[in-house]
Image: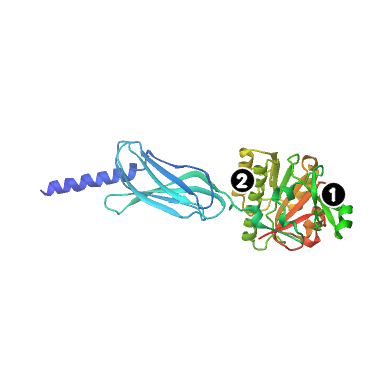
């Protein structure tokens, strides 16, 4: 009887050592997602696949998948018992709680013995990315005109006026160029009146996003107003897409795809592929700045023959932006400045249309 017990203990010890030594050999792990881009709060299905490609059974394998901050979970743990040449798939769902690029790259496989005294760990490096897009906004409900009565004009019309198509007159708000003043009507009504233009699509727009908020740059990053600016930018490009107005995009946010390019530049275009190329950038940028915003403005001036309107979305105006913005107004038909914080808006020329976000 004692020899049977000794034999059983010896056999268990050998199997235990074999499992510990070879258990993680020929174990393959992979992670799949049903989508790699989603809205805030939208579910993304994660599927984890573990495959045992050998003749040895693998008991007691613990798997820990680690997720970055900003998703609704930080880690997901489970245990498996895997037979020879078995493939096991586990699925569950995660949600993005805020905008951003979320990289999932750390998975730990831990193999335990039968007794629980020893374990062996394998760190698996994966490269899975999920982009969570900025919050959706209704643009007309998100902007407040500064020093004008421009709030009654649709977004399409305040972005683009075609001087060839006049549909009436309206009261002067202080934001329109003086050349739009209709003097006969002004004399008739006893106050300044301007020509009211209809909207056409024979125009194109350049949208500039600034992610710089403070000077000097080492001051704390103001995440809230940068995020608001990013969300407003999304609403603007979606409005242009819906209106079939060709639009481009540039930002001074750090370019994560190229160490040579300063910021991002997307030339004018239309279509869902064009729109989502910009939404991907808006979803993935962080708060690092590649170049000063005034450099983006000057580069825009060099390309000014390619568009009629420039729309700037700025978390907060800084003193050094004022002159470049005023100079840009002399080079293009129209400049629209949208800020989250209203500081220094009064320093911009009267011909520049100004809004702040709610």
Residue extending farthest to the front is 188
Colouring: rainbow
Element assignment for label 2: helix
Q: Which mark is residue 346?
A: none
Residue found at x 26% / y 52%? 115
Residue found at x 49% / y 47%? 105
Asked if residue 341 lies left or right of residue 130, the reply is: right
Q: Position of residue 301 (x, y in %)?
A: 80, 46
In this view of the protein, which residue sits in the foreground, 316 or 339?
Answer: 339
Q: Is residue 268 visible?
A: yes
Q: Picture quarter containing residue 348?
A: bottom right
Q: Which mark is residue 330?
A: 1
Q: Position of residue 244 (x, y in %)?
A: 68, 40
Q: Position of residue 75 (x, y in %)?
A: 44, 54
Estimate how packed mark 2 is, as few (under 14), some (14 to 19) or many (20 or more) residues with alpha carbons within 10 Å: many
Identify whether 60 is placed above or below 216: above
């Amino acid at each position: 009887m004692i020899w049977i017990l000794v034999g059983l203990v010896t056999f268990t010890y050998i199997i235990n050592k074999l499992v510990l030594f070879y258990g993680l050999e020929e174990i393959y792990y992979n992670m799949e997602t049903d989508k790699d881009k989603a809205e805030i709060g939208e579910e993304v299905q994660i599927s984890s696949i573990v495959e045992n490609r050998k003749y040895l059974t693998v008991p007691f394998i613990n798997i820990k998948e680690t997720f970055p901050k900003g998703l609704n979970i930080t880690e997901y743990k489970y245990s498996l018992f895997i037979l020879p040449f078995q493939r096991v798939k586990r699925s569950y769902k995660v949600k993005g709680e805020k905008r951003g690029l979320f990289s999932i790259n750390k998975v730990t496989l831990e193999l335990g013995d039968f007794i629980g005294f020893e374990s062996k760990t394998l760190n698996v490096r994966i490269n899975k990315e999920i982009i969570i897009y900025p919050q959706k906004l209704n643009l007309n409900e998100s902007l407040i005109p500064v020093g004008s009565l421009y709030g009654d004009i649709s977004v399409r019309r305040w972005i683009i006026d075609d001087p060839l198509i006049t549909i009436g007159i309206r009261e002067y708000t202080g934001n329109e160029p003086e050349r739009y003043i209709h003097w006969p009507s002004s004399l008739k009504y006893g106050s300044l009146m301007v020509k009211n233009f209809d909207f056409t699509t024979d125009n194109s727009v350049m949208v500039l996003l600034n992610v710089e908020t403070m000077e000097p740059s080492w001051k704390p990053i103001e995440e809230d107003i940068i995020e608001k600016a990013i969300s407003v930018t999304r609403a603007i490009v979606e409005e242009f897409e819906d209106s079939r107005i060709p639009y481009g995009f540039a930002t001074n946010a750090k370019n994560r795809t190229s160490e040579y390019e300063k910021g991002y530049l997307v030339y004018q275009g239309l279509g869902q592929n064009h729109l989502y190329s910009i939404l991907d950038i808006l979803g993935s940028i962080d708060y690092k700045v590649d170049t000063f915003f005034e450099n983006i403005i000057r580069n825009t001036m060099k390309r000014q023959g390619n568009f009629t309107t420039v729309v700037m979305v700025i978390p907060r105006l800084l003193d050094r932006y004022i002159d470049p913005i005023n100079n840009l107004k002399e080079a293009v038909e129209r400049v629209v400045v949208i800020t989250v914080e209203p500081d220094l808006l009064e320093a911009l020329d009267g011909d520049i249309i100004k809004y702040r976000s709610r």
